[in-house]
């Protein structure tokens, strides 16, 4: 599914040099290495500021706190994402609200969000939290329009989408992380840009928000032993920052390699006859990933819909082909969210996606013959 060793082998000398630099500096938490990473990532994402923190989960939590989400507020997100997209809302004391997904992209469906907002004008919604799932931006123009109309803030969950972008006009590409009031990134080891441990980051164009985030990640402390509010220990360590700085130099090449591999899968599947036109209406046994025209997709995952998905997965596993299901249980049906009152059938597209999706091996160093073997094996299963 993912072989991190191949990437490490290609950058080992650079990484070891960077780690050595941190050890020589004896500055292990925050400090110059983290500040430099923050500047470099802000520039990469086209924003004014970036604030490193301990994980993508904390990045979401800190962003919600910094924009002022309070207990009793509501925040609307997708039911089809990693748990943290919704748990961060609950941890701040607010109530997650879910709208269904677009079945083509698996991202939060702006039309369904609009329907919710118009049907429940007296809601306590403070923010929208779209997720750029699998490396493809959600429809940020529509979410921004809705946020303007209903006086909401937008927090992007960009955990899976570093380097992705969304084309707002023919001349304007906006990077993931630059479109909301703030955006959360994760550098979990499997991500496109990944640390050698836990790490996260928040981006924003608002300098006051950035300063607030810097305090919140460090016990609400503007300077040593002065605490103006409650924050957390969510500092980024210098070792992770140093590793991320090495990898940031390669991210464009790695994302390009992911896109090339996605195109190659598309081609192999088209030749296999397993799929008709890629897209949503197909009745073929598998449906390929669908990219909306404004989206520059960075293929954190290459996710198909598959008929008899679970049997196919077992078949591939017997051939030692790793696959994953992101995500088998939609968030509105997670046991810990029973109190929200959602039932099976409430968000049918998210529920269908949970039954049908299958992520295939995808990483920049994946070899052509490995991709051919994956597609041949899937063809063998259906033939
Ligand atoms: C969409 C999404 N949001 C949030 C997170 C949380 O990030 P982390 O694992 O760094 O806490 C992840 C990653 O796992 C994710 O995929």
Image (cartoon, rainbow, N blue to C red):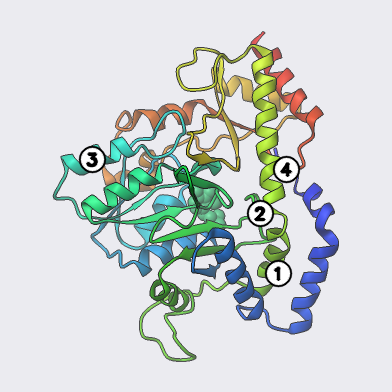
C-alpha distance separating marks 2 and 4: 14 Å
Task: State the image coordinates of residue 286 (x, y, percent, origin top left).
Answer: 57, 19
Question: How crowded is the residue under tag 4: few (<14 C-alpha within 10 Å), some, or many (20+)?
Answer: many
Badge 4 marks a residue whose secondary structure is loop
Mark 2 or mark 4, which has the lower sequence index? Answer: 2
Q: Position of residue 287 (x, y in %)?
A: 54, 21
Quarter of the image holding residue 358? top right
Residue 23 lies in what quarter of the image?
bottom right
Real-space CA distance between mark 2 and mark 3, rounded to the nearest whole angstrom: 36 Å
Which residue sits furthest left? 122
> In the rendered view, does 343 fall on the left or right side of 260?
left
Label 2: how many residues lie within 10 Å, few (<14), some (14-19) or many (20+)?
Answer: some
Question: Whole-Å distance between the Cαs marked 4 and 1?
Answer: 21 Å
Q: Say which label, 1 or 3, has the lower sequence index.
A: 3
Asked whether the beta carbons under mark 3 and mark 4 sit within 8 Å of each other, the answer is: no
Compute the Cα span from label 2 to label 1.
14 Å
Could you tell me how far apart the alpha carbons at marks 1 and 3 are, in whole angstroms? Answer: 44 Å
The residue at 47%/89% (across/down) is 223
Towards the viewer: 363 or 338: 363
Is the residue under label 3 in contact with that under label 1 (CB below 8 Å)?
Answer: no
Sequence-wise, which precedes: disc 2 or disc 3?
3
| Residue behind label 4 places its C-beta within 8 angstroms of ligand 1 | no
Query: Which residue in the protein does label 2 denote?
Result: 189
Query: Which one is closest to the eye, mark 2 or mark 3?
Result: 3
Q: Which residue is mark 4?
A: 364
């Amino acid at each position: 599914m993912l072989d991190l060793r191949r990437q490490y082998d290609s950058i080992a000398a650079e990484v070891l040099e960077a780690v050595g630099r941190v050890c020589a500096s004896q500055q292990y938490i925050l400090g110059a290495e983290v500040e430099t990473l923050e500047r470099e990532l802000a520039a990469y994402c086209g924003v004014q500021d970036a604030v490193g923190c301990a994980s993508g989960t904390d990045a979401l939590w800190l962003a919600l706190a910094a924009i002022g989400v309070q207990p009793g507020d509501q925040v609307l997100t997708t039911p089809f994402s990693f748990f943290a997209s919704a748990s961060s809302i609950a941890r701040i004391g607010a109530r997650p609200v879910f709208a269904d997904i677009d079945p083509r992209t698996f991202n939060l469906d702006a039309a369904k969000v609009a329907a919710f907002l118009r049907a429940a004008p007296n809601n306590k919604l403070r923010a929208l939290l779209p997720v750029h799932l699998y490396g493809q931006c959600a429809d940020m123009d529509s979410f921004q329009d809705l946020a303007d109309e209903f006086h909401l803030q937008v927090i992007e969950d960009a955990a899976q989408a570093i380097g992705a972008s969304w084309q707002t006009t023919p001349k304007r590409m906006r990077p993931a992380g630059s479109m909301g009031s703030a955006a959360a990134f994760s550098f979990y080891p499997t991500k496109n840009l990944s640390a050698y441990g836990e790490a996260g980051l928040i981006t924003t164009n608002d300098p006051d928000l950035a300063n607030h985030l810097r305090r919140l990640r460090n016990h609400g402390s503007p300077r040593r032993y002065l605490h103006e509010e409650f924050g957390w220990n969510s500092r980024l360590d210098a070792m992770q920052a140093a590793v991320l700085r090495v990898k940031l130099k390669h991210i464009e090449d790695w994302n390009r390699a992911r896109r090339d591999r996605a195109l190659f899968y598309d081609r192999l599947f088209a030749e296999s006859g397993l799929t008709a036109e890629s897209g949503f209406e197909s009745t073929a046994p598998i449906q390929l990933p669908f990219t909306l025209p404004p989206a520059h997709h960075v293929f954190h995952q290459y996710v198909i819909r598959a008929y008899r998905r679970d049997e196919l997965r077992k078949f591939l596993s017997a051939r030692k082909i790793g696959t994953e299901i992101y995500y088998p249980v939609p968030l509105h049906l997670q046991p810990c969210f029973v109190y929200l009152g959602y039932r099976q059938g409430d968000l049918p597209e998210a529920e269908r996606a949970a039954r049908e999706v299958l992520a295939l091996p995808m990483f920049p160093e994946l070899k052509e013959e490995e991709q051919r073997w994956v597609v041949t094996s899937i063809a063998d299963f259906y033939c």
